Structures are given as structure tokens and as C-alpha cells.
Image (cartoon, rainbow, N blue to C red):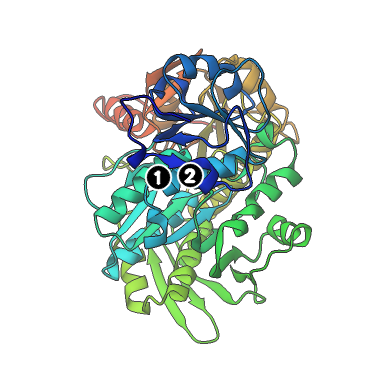
Amino acid sequence: MSLPKSLSAMNSHSIRRLLPSASFVGCGDLLFQRISCDSRQCEPGTLFVAVPGSKHDGRHYIHEAVSRGACGVLTSVPLVDINVPQCVVSDIRRCYGWICQYLAGQPANSLDLLGVTGTNGKTTISWMLRSILRAASKRTGLLGTIEYDDAGNCPVEATMTTPDPHKIADWLGQMVRHRATHAVMEVSSHALDQRRIAGLSLRSAIISNISHDHLDYHGDLKSYMLAKSSIQDYCRADADFIINGDDLHIQEMLKMRCGRLEPVTVGFSERNQFQISPLEQTVSRGRFALCSDSDRMEFTLPLPCQHNMLNAALAAATALKLGMSVDEIQAGIEQGSLPPGRMQRISAGQSFDCFVDYAHTPDAIENVVRTMKSVTAGRLICLFGAGGNRDSEKRPLMAKAAQSADVIILTADNSREEPTHQIIDDICRGFENNRTPELIEEDRTMAIQWAVDHAQPGDCVLILGKGHEKGQEINGVIHPFDDRIEVKKALANRFSLPDTPCVKVPA
């Protein structure tokens, strides 16, 4: 085929050479200079990828892509009434990811990639791993829920947990240019199902846990587990596969889908290769030992909750397998920066504790509530909501998970296009033994103020669900909103009026 005069064959790529098993419609080969699955970004020389999706089908945008100059279409089925060459492949998502890596110069081959997946804990584990590697003088990038860090310039705010293949390739390329040797990636179940990390080879893969979440997308728990298990498909032959050995769903997942990698188990029970032994737990810290056949390490975390001991242990075991020393691991975990909005303490000198946390699944809520209740001298006040237009089956389970809190406040999370009162009604269906929330307040600002105003000395206030997020989506509009800022405002409001009586809530 001939290229437009503005394009040079010298810097073009042959699809037939890259994908020799592909078939073609309207041509014997397809030359292109760049690739995109966004029709709005197409221009002469662009290969448009018609990725099918649950919400948006790329095939609906082919004519727009062609009108903008796309030189051809990568598709999973032959298309009619298309006047540009077509390349037909059986797995379009995998091919797209692989081509993106190729066009970026295959930067992943120059990095030790560490992939972290799981329902909860991905962000904390990833930040701890980056911190450990930095303590070992390894230049390390990160792609995750909170930020993208290319190991050179200032990190930027993330747009999604695992970006699309084009952005992954670009960010890994930037890491290589900044002389990074390692990269840590949070890998969501959506990303695994959509093969966003195709073309990558992981040096280590970690599965933190599997519990009820995202079933609105995956359909059922089995499909969700299978998506998580597919992280093994992206591992090198010599990769370390680190798992939470106490998680029953992970054990079930391994029975459903046996992989070629022998898992390294981490957990609290004696059967694990790395066993966690809690030594001390208070409202402000946790201390534990991690023991294996050859090593014993002790850690003091500036984070409460046993699940953070597990997160730290998974990061430590992974780092040991990578060859990091015990001193480097301890320095990285104990002295490194922790992710914002993960059991983040908010203090203005008040006589009670306030924490903001991202817990938004039944399992995460249960873990936080159970641990904090055990170390709190007074009452545990727990505020949360649930996201709209998402997995509604987990809502009553969230209520059950929070039921042991002394005071429960239900409010809006990101209601999106769903009525907040309907979401709260769904949550309330999960309360047992005639338990009801002490307050239902749809306005999250007012709910947080109420929680702070009613806290007494020795109490602990948990603000759950949004963590690091800086916006709240209501009726399709994202409003600026940060739980941490709202808690600080609430504290300022309460303590700027010292004579205001504290209204007591029955224990």
C-alpha cells in the first residue's frame, strides 16, 4: 500500500511483520506510524484499534477515526463498509498492548517490574515496595491508584489504578530514560480482564487478598478470582509469586487455575513460609515479627491494624526474594513515606483519634473496625457510604462488616447517577439484630461534622470510603471534596467554640 506523501516509510511499521498470524482485509500488509484506540486522537499514519467494550465499542467510532486520517483499523472481526485496510486478530487487546510496548522501544525489558493485585492493600504494598527499593538505592518508578511516578520528575496524580496500554508504555519509557531499574505497578482486576499489561513480563507478582468487590463488572466471584489469577500469565519464568496464604479465596483460585509458578505464602498461620507474629498493637502503631526458615525481622509501623502488618509482610517477603537486605527492608518500611488516605491520622490536638481511610469493601471495613475497636479506649465511631452505579450486592455486606462499631453514621460516598437514599437503604438491609445507624445524613460534610462534634475523650472516629480522593461525584458532577480537609474543618469548627457542649451518644 502507498502512504500519504506526508508520511515516510522509513519510520513506519509493518503489521504483517509484527503480527505474522494476523489476516488482512483490503491489503496484504498495513503500514502505520502510531497507534490509538481513541478516534479523537487519530491523524494520518495512525492505526486505529477498534477495542470492544462494555460501555463503548470502538467499532462505533471507526468512521470518525478514518475521517481524521487513520490509515487502517485493527479489529477482532472483519468489518463491512470500511474504506481503509483492516488487520484482523483474535485477541485485539493483547495485540494492542504488545504493539504499544513495541512502539515505545519495549522499555519493560529494561526494568524489573513488580505487579501488585488484590481487592485491598495494593496501594500500601506498592508504596512500601517503592520505599524499600529506594532504601536499597534502586531508582524506582510507580504506577498506581494515587500517583504515577517516573523516578525522575515530580509524580503526577493518577487517573486510574492501571492506565491504558499506551500510557503504560509511555510511563515505563520515561522511567527508563530516568535510569530507573525497577517499577512497581498496581494491577486492577479490570486491567487484567482487559489485558492492559499485555507485553509486560513481571519479575514479581503479589496477590494481597480477594474479597467481594467489582461484581458489577465481573458478574460473579468466580470470574473475579479468575481475572486476578491471570496475573501469573504476565510473569517471567523466574518470577516470584507472592500470595496471602491465609486467604481462602486465593486458595480456591489456585485450585481453579493452576499456574506454572509455585507460590510463596505470607500470613499469620503457621503453614505460611513467611509467618507474621503480632508483638504490639495500639491505636497509633503496630509492631510485628516476620519469620521464615532463614530470616527473622521485626517491624514497627506507624499504622494500626493487622491488615497493614500483612501489607508490610507481603512487601518485605517480595523484597527479600529480590535480594534486598534486612536492613534495607526495615528502613524502607519504617522510614518511608506512606500513601495518603490509608489510615491517615488527622490531629488538631483533640482528645480523641480521627482516621481517614479508603476502606470501601466489606472485608476492608471489617478489618479496620475490628482492629480499631480492640485498641480504642472509648467508643468507635464509624462513618461510611457506598458508591453508586457500582456493585450493589456488597452494600448490605458493608453494614454487617461495620456492625460492631459503637456509633454508625451513613452518608453519601460517590453516588454518581444513583439516588443517595437508595444506596443507604441498600446498606441498611445488612444490619442484624435490630441494629440501626445512629445517624443517616446524605450530606457528607454535615455527617463528618456530626461525627467530630459527638466524639468524646478516648473515642476513635473512622471516616471510611474515600481516602485520598479529592472529589465527590453526585448526579454526574464531580465536586471538590477531600475527607481529610473536611475533618480538619470539622475539628476547627468544634474547637473554635470551646463552650459548645458535646452531645453524648449512647454507647
Q: Position of residue 428 (x, y in %)?
A: 68, 27
Eyeballing the image, is 458 above or below 140?
A: above
Eyeballing the image, is 47 above or below 55?
A: below
Q: Residue at x 61, y 55 (%)?
A: 209
Q: Residue at x 37, y 29 (%)?
A: 470
Counting every numbered tag in the picture gives 2
Between residue 373 and residue 398, name the one nearer to us: 398
Taking the image as drawn, is residue 457 in sight? Answer: no
Q: Which structural element holds mark 2?
A: helix
Label 2 Cα crowd, 10 Å radius (few <14 / some 14-19 / many 20+): many
Residue furthest to the left: 153
Q: Amino acid at mark 2?
A: Ile
The residue tagged 2 is 99
Mark 1–mark 2 Cα distance, whole angstroms, equals 6 Å
Side (left or right) of 144 relative to 257: left
Side (left or right) of 63 relative to 224: left
Eyeballing the image, is 390 above or below 443?
A: below
Q: Are marks 1 and 2 in contact (CB under 8 Å)?
A: yes
Q: Position of residue 48 (x, y in %)?
A: 49, 28
Q: Position of residue 500 (x, y in %)?
A: 32, 24
Residue furthest to the front: 2
Taking the image as drawn, is residue 125 in sight? Answer: yes
Q: Position of residue 109 (x, y in %)?
A: 41, 60
Q: Which structural element holds mark 1?
A: helix
- The image quarter containing residue 247 is bottom right
The residue tagged 1 is 103
Side (left or right) of 248 relative to 40: right
Q: Which image quarter is the C terminus in?
A: top right
Between residue 255 and residue 310, name the one nearer to us: 255
Q: Amino acid at mark 1?
A: Leu
